[in-house]
């Protein structure tokens, strides 16, 4: 997504600026911190989804979102 908006030269300049600011010895720590942040963000998003489904179930609402390749079972007429 970001790569589609930026060309190769712009990305190279951004990487060069990051190297100048943090230095090569700090980049692994920076990457680790960003990775932890993204994992925590994903975990929170999943928890919000679980909480919403539980709340819907308590209210008696039915989740009608499709789940993978499951096909509805035929219940017969009526």
Image: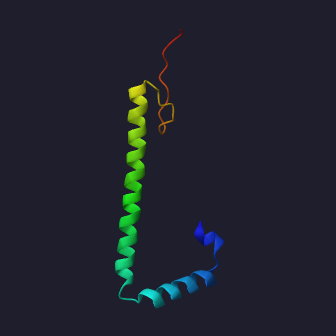
Which residue shows up at 48% across the image and 84% down it? 18
Left or right: 23 in relation to 77? left
Which residue shows up at 64% across the image and 78% down it? 7
Residue 35 image offset from top left, x and y in percent: 38, 68
Q: How is the image coloured?
A: rainbow
Which image quarter holds the N terminus?
bottom right
The one nearer the camera, 7 or 23, is 23
Among the 4 quarters of the image, the one containing residue 29: bottom left
Which residue shows up at 51% across the image and 31% down it? 64
Q: Is residue 72 above or below residue 2?
A: above
The one nearer the camera, 6 or 69, is 6
Q: Is residue 56 above or below residue 11?
A: above
Which residue shows up at 57% across the image and 85% down it? 12
Left or right: 77 in relation to 56? right
Residue 67 image offset from top left, x and y in percent: 47, 37
Among the 4 quarters of the image, the one containing residue 33: bottom left
Q: How many marks?
A: 0
Residue 32 image offset from top left, x and y in percent: 35, 73
Residue 76 image offset from top left, x and y in percent: 50, 12
Q: Is residue 1 above or below residue 66?
A: below
């Amino acid at each position: 997504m970001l790569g589609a908006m930026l060309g190769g030269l712009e990305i190279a300049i951004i990487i060069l600026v990051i190297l100048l600011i943090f230095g090569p010895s700090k980049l692994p720590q920076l990457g680790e911190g960003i990775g932890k942040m993204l994992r925590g963000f994903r975990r929170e998003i999943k928890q919000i989804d679980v909480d919403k489904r539980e709340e819907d179930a308590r209210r008696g609402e039915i989740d009608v979102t499709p789940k993978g390749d499951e096909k509805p079972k035929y219940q017969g007429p009526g």
